């Protein structure tokens, strides 16, 4: 049996999936993990990774490498997305990742992937679980959104677009007060609208029937809407949420002070200060999908780009 290791390093988090080939295009999870490392902290302002951010990422990746060695991974792929595309000192990052990944597979290196490939991998990972589900979560055509720290991908079978807007980027750019002032929220909404407009123009949303959302902002919103006392990926995966409920939660999060957000049971500590930014991006997506496609609910998947990377290793 082939055992693969997939690592996704984004602006806010680094994640690992160790999985076996279950046949018929499916995976059996062995390990699935996430660490908030905030690699992209300050990149918008300085154009560079900080020494501290690279150090946090190194520590997390070192643990992932040991997990892959322990579990006998035979194929590995690590991809880096938005923040790494933008950093002028990204060679420091690549030197570090090559050193660590070489312990699993000599010559393995992290890859900076394009927004188009990021979107395609997210779509493959997310839609596989929904389209093969027998519980009626939705039917195609699907529109998948991967709302990350530095970018947001909107993708359908026929088109995809990666926008330079995400929960970390928006928070650092616009949301500085606790809670954000009305003026900051207005500025943030205008910034989101500007960054998402090309995506909405490029992707034929009118054809979509089901909205599938992946990544931490949307899974956290799902957990809150489900009323969970703590984050439970099994309950969140393929859960369905009326857009009206998601919009209500988004508005509440934007208006909350940091301490109140931190007290929410499903809230990961590393998302507390950026979830408001993610909520504003979600609101813009929800409004457009409702207006253009008549979509009235969100299906949230715990399967995403990691699963797409792992499946690609099995091709």
Image (cartoon, rainbow, N blue to C red):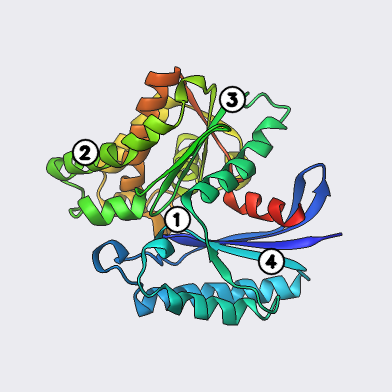
> Tag 3: Cα neighbours inside 10 Å, few (<14), some, or many (≥20)?
some
Give the quarter of the image for residue 140: top right
Determine whether the residue tagged by mark 1 lies in a helix, strand or loop: loop
Disc 2: which residue:
190
Determine whether the residue tagged by mark 4 lies in a helix, strand or loop: strand
Check the picture and name the quadrant holding the N terminus: bottom right
Disc 3: which residue:
141
The dot on residue 188 is none
Disc 4: which residue:
76
CB under 8 Å between discs 2 and 1: no
Residue 83 in view here: yes
Cα gap from disc 4 to disc 1, whole angstroms: 27 Å
Question: Quick check: 61 left or right of 149?
Answer: right
Give the quarter of the image for residue 50: bottom left
Cα gap from disc 3 to disc 4, whole angstroms: 31 Å
Determine whether the residue tagged by mark 3 lies in a helix, strand or loop: loop
User: Quick check: 38 above or below 153?
Assistant: below
Residue 30 pos. (x, y %): 73, 59
Residue 123 pos. (x, y %): 58, 41
Cα gap from disc 3 to disc 2, whole angstroms: 29 Å
Disc 1: which residue:
268
Dot 3 or dot 4: first in sequence order is 4
């Amino acid at each position: 049996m082939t055992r693969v290791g997939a690592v996704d390093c984004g602006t806010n988090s680094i994640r690992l999936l160790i999985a076996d080939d279950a046949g018929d295009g499916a995976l059996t999870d062995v390990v699935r993990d996430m660490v908030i490392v905030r690699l992209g902290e300050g990149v918008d302002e300085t154009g560079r990774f900080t020494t501290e951010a690279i150090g946090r990422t190194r520590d997390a990746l070192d643990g992932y490498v040991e997990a892959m060695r322990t579990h006998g991974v035979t194929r590995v792929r690590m991809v880096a997305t938005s923040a790494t595309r933008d950093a002028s000192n990204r060679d420091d990052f690549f030197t570090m990742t090559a050193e660590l990944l070489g312990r699993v597979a000599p010559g393995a290196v992290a890859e900076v992937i394009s927004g188009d490939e990021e979107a395609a991998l997210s779509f493959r990972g997310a839609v596989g679980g929904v389209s093969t589900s027998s519980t009626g979560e939705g039917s195609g055509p699907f529109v998948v959104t991967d709302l990350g720290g530095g970018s947001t991908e909107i993708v359908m079978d026929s088109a995809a677009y990666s926008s330079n807007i995400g929960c970390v980027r928006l928070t650092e750019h616009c949301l500085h007060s606790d809670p954000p002032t009305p003026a900051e929220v207005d500025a943030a909404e205008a910034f989101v609208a500007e960054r998402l407009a090309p995506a909405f123009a490029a992707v034929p949303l009118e054809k979509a029937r089901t909205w599938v959302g992946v990544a931490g902002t949307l899974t956290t919103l799902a957990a809150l809407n489900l009323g969970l006392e703590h984050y439970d990926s099994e309950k969140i995966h393929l859960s369905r949420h009326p857009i009206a409920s998601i919009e209500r939660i988004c508005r509440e999060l934007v208006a909350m002070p940091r301490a109140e957000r931190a007290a929410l049971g499903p809230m990961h500590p590393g998302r507390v200060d950026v979830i408001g930014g993610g909520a504003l991006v979600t609101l813009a997506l929800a409004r457009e999908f409702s207006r253009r496609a008549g979509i009235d609910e969100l299906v949230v998947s715990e399967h995403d780009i990691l699963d797409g990377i792992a499946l690609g290793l099995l091709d």
